[in-house]
Image: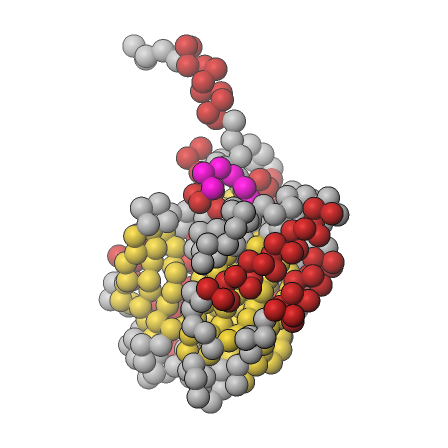
């Protein structure tokens, strides 16, 4: 049986209303495009989280395939035309070029892909976030694949006991390093504890060498040289049979962690797990949201999805996120609610410094 490639590609091409959601006409335009042009796809599923359109596709062409990436690009361009017609906010904001150049990476949309041989049972979870950055996955991926308090399989499952390799990317210097866990866990935490710069790009089983997780690491502001929107990353995690159980992969989101993003991409806030019916952030354009859709992959077909965070057992996580939001909002423009000056993306700091340049004097 040929290997299956799972490609998750997302883009914000226009919000409805403001940054809160996606107009149904855009989703229908994308579905029609994939149905008409994507005959090489084995299967696909189109959805949205907040104002981001999410394309979940299976095929046999491998990762970084030009034909697959162009299909996604053209679908987003078609949706952008509709967004402009409807005068939606930020129409086409994630498309940083006027023409496709062979690979969608570096052009604005976020991409998480993996290629693998289907196991006897192949459950996967597609995590999709809004109003945050790629580093938001660092904490949950660490919990899933390196923390035995979260994932008891690391202790009691012989096929997981050797641990996992983490491929970590430096988004500033464009470098990568692989950490072998558990023995290099402390070294790795020095890096991934700074999620604004270092991101977990992929995780691999040390028992089989197979890929276990893949995330998008695109940073829009670094590619564009200006603020054009938050990155709103995606992440794919394979589960069971030598990998974390579905419940182990979901458990890190039961207690919200703080991420960068939220309003104007310039604030810290809790990552709230929510169902598809709750994925339209409105309070202060947030707080940041994460949706988890589960699929069984069978001969390349996407069987599902199951909306995991629709479970009432995450009600307490949402309550905690709301309490954290109340507290952080009370701080207004003061850190740590507002990001540090070095991380602000919608900032007047350069203009203020220029105006004050003649008034800044040495301290005696």
Quarter of the rendering containing residue 354: top left
Q: Residue at x 44, y 33 (%)?
A: 341
Magenta span of residues: 224-230
Q: Residue at x 44, y 67 (%)?
A: 65
Q: Quadrant of the N terminus?
A: bottom left
Judged from this view, the residue extending furthest toward the left is 183
Magenta stretch, main secondary structure, is loop
Residue closest to the eye, 275 or 103: 103
Report whether residue 113 is seen: yes
Residue closest to the eye, 113 or 288: 113
Report whether residue 251 is seen: no
229 vs 175: above or below = above
261 vs 200: above or below = above
Residue 250 position, x and y percent, is 52, 69
Residue 173 position, x and y percent, is 31, 46
Residue 110 position, x and y percent, is 50, 56
Which of the colour schemes (rainbow, by chain, secondary structure, one colour) is used? Answer: secondary structure
Q: Residue at x 34, y 83 (%)?
A: 159
Give the left or right position of residue 230, taking residue 315 as reference: left
Disc tally is 0
Q: Quadrant of the C terminus?
A: top left
Residue 336 position, x and y percent, is 48, 39
Q: Is residue 225 magenta?
A: yes
Q: Residue at x 73, y 44 (%)?
A: 87
Residue closest to the eye, 209 or 274: 209
Q: Is residue 151 magenta?
A: no
């Amino acid at each position: 049986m040929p290997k299956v490639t799972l490609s998750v590609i997302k883009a914000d091409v226009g919000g409805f209303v403001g940054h809160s959601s996606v107009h149904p006409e855009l989703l229908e335009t994308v579905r029609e495009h994939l149905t008409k042009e994507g005959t090489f796809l084995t299967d696909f599923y189109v959805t949205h989280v907040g104002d981001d359109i999410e394309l979940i596709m299976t095929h046999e062409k491998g990762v970084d395939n030009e034909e697959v990436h162009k299909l996604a690009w053209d679908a987003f361009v078609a949706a952008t035309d509709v967004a402009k017609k409807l005068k939606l906010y930020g129409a086409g904001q994630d498309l940083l070029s006027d023409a496709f150049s062979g690979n969608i990476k570096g052009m604005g949309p976020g991409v998480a892909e993996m290629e693998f041989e289907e196991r006897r049972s192949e459950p996967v979870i597609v995590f999709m976030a809004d109003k945050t950055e790629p580093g938001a996955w660092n904490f949950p991926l660490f919990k899933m694949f390196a923390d035995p308090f979260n994932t008891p399989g690391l202790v009691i499952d012989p096929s997981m006991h050797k641990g996992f390799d983490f491929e970590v990317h430096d988004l500033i210097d464009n470098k990568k390093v692989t950490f072998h866990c558990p023995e290099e866990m402390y070294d790795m935490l020095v890096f991934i504890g700074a999620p604004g710069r270092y991101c977990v790009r992929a995780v691999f089983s040390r028992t089989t060498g197979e890929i276990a997780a893949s995330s998008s690491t695109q940073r829009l502001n670094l590619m564009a040289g200006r603020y054009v929107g938050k990155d709103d990353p995606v992440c794919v995690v394979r589960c069971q049979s030598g990998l974390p159980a579905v419940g182990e992969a979901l458990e890190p989101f039961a207690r919200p962690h703080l991420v960068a993003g939220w309003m104007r991409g310039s604030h810290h806030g809790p990552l709230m797990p929510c169902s598809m019916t709750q994925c339209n952030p409105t309070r202060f354009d947030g707080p940041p949201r994460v949706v988890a859709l589960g699929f069984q992959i069978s001969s390349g077909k996407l069987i599902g999805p199951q909306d995991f965070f629709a479970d009432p057992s995450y009600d307490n996580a949402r309550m905690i996120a709301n309490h954290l939001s109340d507290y952080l909002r009370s701080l207004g423009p003061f850190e740590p609610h507002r990001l540090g000056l070095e991380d602000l993306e919608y900032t007047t700091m350069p203009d203020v410094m220029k105006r004050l340049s003649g008034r800044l004097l040495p301290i005696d």
